[in-house]
Image (cartoon, coloured by chain):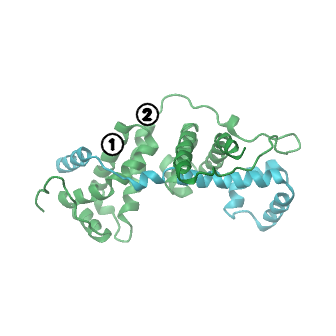
Amino acid sequence: MSEPASPPVPPVLDEEALAQGLRSGDPQAFEQVVRTYGGRLLAVTRRILRDEDAARDAVQDAFVSAFKARRQFKADSRVSTWLHRIAVNSALMRLRTQRRKAEDPIDPLLPGFEDAGRHREHFVAWQEPADVTVSRRETAAAVRRAIDQLPESYRTVLLLRDIEGLDTEETARMLGVTANAVKIRLHRARMALRTLLAPEFQEAAS
Amino acid sequence: VTCRELTAFLDDYLAGELPAETRVRFEAHLAVCVNCHVYLAQYQETIELGRRAFVEDDETPAMPDDLIQAIVKSLKDE
């Protein structure tokens, strides 16, 4: 492959060709893999790390790890899935080194109950705002802000399970916790997120 | 079943992981408790809103060229 002219227009390769390029260890073929999947992986590391420099470093780490581990890539897996898991792992490793301050307790964001076990709060049904096109973006931004407010260990589990689509066992392995801990954290994270989103949608309903 | 018990196992209920007998008791509670009914709907909606919140990221997966070059360089150094 010759040096592409500026601006570089990568040829569109199918999954099979990219998988071959990946396994071959040829740096130019691997460059195609980087061009094809890099953007999506950067989105993943940005979500987890919320810091542009750290996210870029994590993507770089991920591709270097993938390149080194290319022989472990199985022919029956998808390149995108394989790289996605490596990028998640790489971002989590950086997150561990970043995490410094003690996190806030999640309890104030969980539902409260009376002695008889009834909900203390009266819930009002949510409504979608009327202006769908504009509000969809605004809603997404509000939800991202709310997710950012979750205590870190809950935010991470919610991201991995509900956004990145990892299953309970994979999430547990990546975080070095038990599957049961993942289940509990995910349930609490969703309840806390519901609490954080409620003012947004109750306003829209009223 | 109380609201507290139902809330504690809401995720298992939605995942269909509750024993049939417990499920029936949960559904009996949901049929008479409007508050839990609304809460369950909002819990499901929260999951869906979370999933949709980052869809834009996947629509515009731009990869900065300098980052591509940095990665390619580090691979050549490997």
Q: Circle 1 — which element? A: helix
Question: How far across and how far down the image is residue A166, in percent?
Answer: 51, 57
- Which chain has been coloured cyan in this picture? B
To which quarter of the image does residue A71 belong? bottom left
Q: Chain of mark 2?
A: A
Colour in which chain A is shown?
Answer: green
Q: Extreme front residue here?
A: A131
Question: How far across and how far down the image is residue A79, in percent?
Answer: 35, 63
Question: How far across and how far down the image is residue B6, in percent?
Answer: 78, 53
Residue under label 1, please give it: A56
Which residue corresponds to the image point at 40% horizontal and 39% vertical from the top-left?
A94
Residue under label 2, please give it: A98
Q: Nearer the viewer, mark 2 or mark 1?
A: 1
Viewer-nearest residue: B57 or A164:
B57
Left or right of A141, for residue B44: right
Q: Extreme right residue here?
A: A116
Label annotation for residue B40: none
> Which comes before the other along the chain, label 2 or label 1?
1
Viewer-nearest residue: A193 or A24:
A193
Q: Quadrant of the N terminus of chain A?
A: bottom left
Marks 2 and 1 on same chain: yes
Left or right of A99, for residue B69: left
Q: Chain of mark 1?
A: A
The correct choice, above or below, for B1 with respect to A141 in the image is below
Q: Amino acid at mark 2?
A: Gln
Left or right of A29, for residue A59: right
Q: Quadrant of the C terminus of chain A?
A: top right
Q: Circle 2 — which element? A: helix
Which residue corresponds to the image point at 33% horizontal and 62% vertical from the top-left?
A72
